[in-house]
Amino acid sequence: MASTAGIELGQARRDGTVAATVTDLGGLVVHGAVDPAAAPAALPLSLDDVAFVVSVAGRAPSLHNTQPWKFKVRGNVIELVADTSRLLRHVDPAGRELTISCGAALFGLRLGLRRLGYIPGVDVLPDAAAPSLIARVRPIGRAATTRDEAELLAAVPHRHTHRGPFTGGEVPSRLFALLTLDAAAEGCELVLIEDPVLVGDLAVLVSAAAAEQRRSAQIAAELRCWVVPAGSHRGDGVPAEARLEGSDLAAAQHGVPLPRQEGCNAHDSLPQRDFGLPGTEQAGGMPPSMTAVLATAGDTAADWVRAGQALHRLLVHAATRWVFARLQSQPLESARHRDQVRALLGLTGVPQMLLQLGRANSAPATGRRSQGDVMAD
Ligand SMILES: Cc1cc2nc3c(=O)[nH]c(=O)nc-3n(C[C@H](O)[C@H](O)[C@H](O)COP(=O)(O)O)c2cc1C
């Protein structure tokens, strides 16, 4: 779909799989066929290595923090398998967002291997007869971790979906340019939406999609399973603390309206998903400083895996500079609204995620499942 200096992307093979070779960050990204039978014993993964790599993958963003993945270890091959028992059947019937979430975890596996000095070999959707098998990943060589990769890894723990107010200050355009390269390196496109009128029109579509979902009893019931009350020790789902932070959480719980700061343009912020609790979404604070859409060339499972890898990669990269994103996917969950978003933004590709970026200096962590829970055996 795209190419950046020295990087060949998305070359489809006759059998439909992608044989792109991308080695932009010291081998962070190496796609190629992985034959588990031929895995060289010379590059073994210890139990500690697997635990580390899986823990990095587990910090990936996922729809409603469902973490719809399992990891299977066979020799030095880590298989990433979609856990379809965690599919949101009503909001995500085709499993698009589930697959994006798994793609995000796949990026974590790659990054974790790079931290250990391994070059990851990745085979995406290797078995047409087993569509839940998202990828096989194994070390295929060694290369010293680069400074960029070490920085990315250091940002994994504080990377988060930012629903609270931003601190203000511009996101440097140079950083955004680098994020577009991240997306391109993963075979995706990150498109800046500069025109405030377009952002306003997008906000209208977000509201319409949210209102439509609110009218569905099935979606509401599904959502209730993934909204976690404040103080819960659950390792998945979206906790109240992640929706609102600190005193803002207390204010909202007591019905105190949050202040809107001077100079904020109401059209700058897209309405956020209310997680079935209308009125608790943040209204005050500084608005995000950039709005963008992540798009793919097509709309197949392979595109969704690419979108997930691109998403996690660029979010972690942004987090290295304490820039975080609000994510909005509601208007992309119905074909009609998705087509409208595509037409409104004049996209040639398929929109997979709306992002609003801004600076922040707090990082509320959402829970994650234990390693025991995510290992298949
Ligand atoms: C496919 C996908 C769709 C998402 N959609 C939304 C959304 O519409 N609204 C939102 O606030 N967060 C959204 N998120 C963010 C998740 O809720 C978030 O990743 C998850 O709760 C884990 O929290 P963390 O990102 O802070 O680690 C989405 C994430 C993914 C991967």
Image (tube, helix red, strand yellow):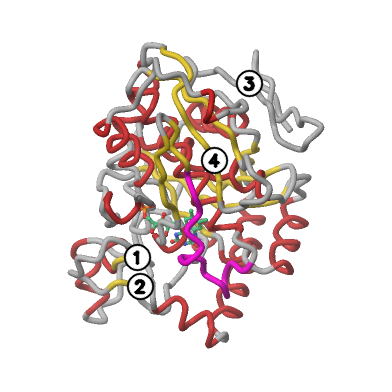
| Nearer to us: label 2 or label 4 | 4
The 10 Å Cα crowd at callout 1, few under 14, some 14 to 19, many 20 or more, is many
First to last magenta residue range: 80-93
Identify which residue is drawn at 57% across, 79% down. 211
Q: Residues within 10 Å of mark 4 (few under 14, many from 20)?
A: many
Instruction: Report how far apart the C-alphas of labels 2 and 4 lie in the structure.
Output: 29 Å
Residue sitting nearer the eye, 78 or 94:
78
Question: Is the residue under label 2 in contact with that under label 1 (CB below 8 Å)?
Answer: yes
Write down the residue under mark 1: 238
Which amino acid type corresponds to the residue marked 3 in the rendered image?
Thr
Amino acid beneath label 4: Ala
**330 left or right, relative to 272:** right
Q: How far apart are labels 3 and 1 at the CA level? A: 36 Å
The disc, 4 or 3, on the residue closer to the chain's N-terminal end is 3
**Distance in Å between CA atoms under marks 3 and 2:** 40 Å
Q: Is the residue indicated by label 4 positioned so its CB lies within 8 Å of ligand 1?
A: no
**Which amino acid type corresponds to the residue marked 1 in the rendered image?**
Val
Relative image position of residue 320 (x, y in whole percent):
35, 32
Kindly report which numbered mark, 1 or 4, lies closer to the viewer in this rendering: 4
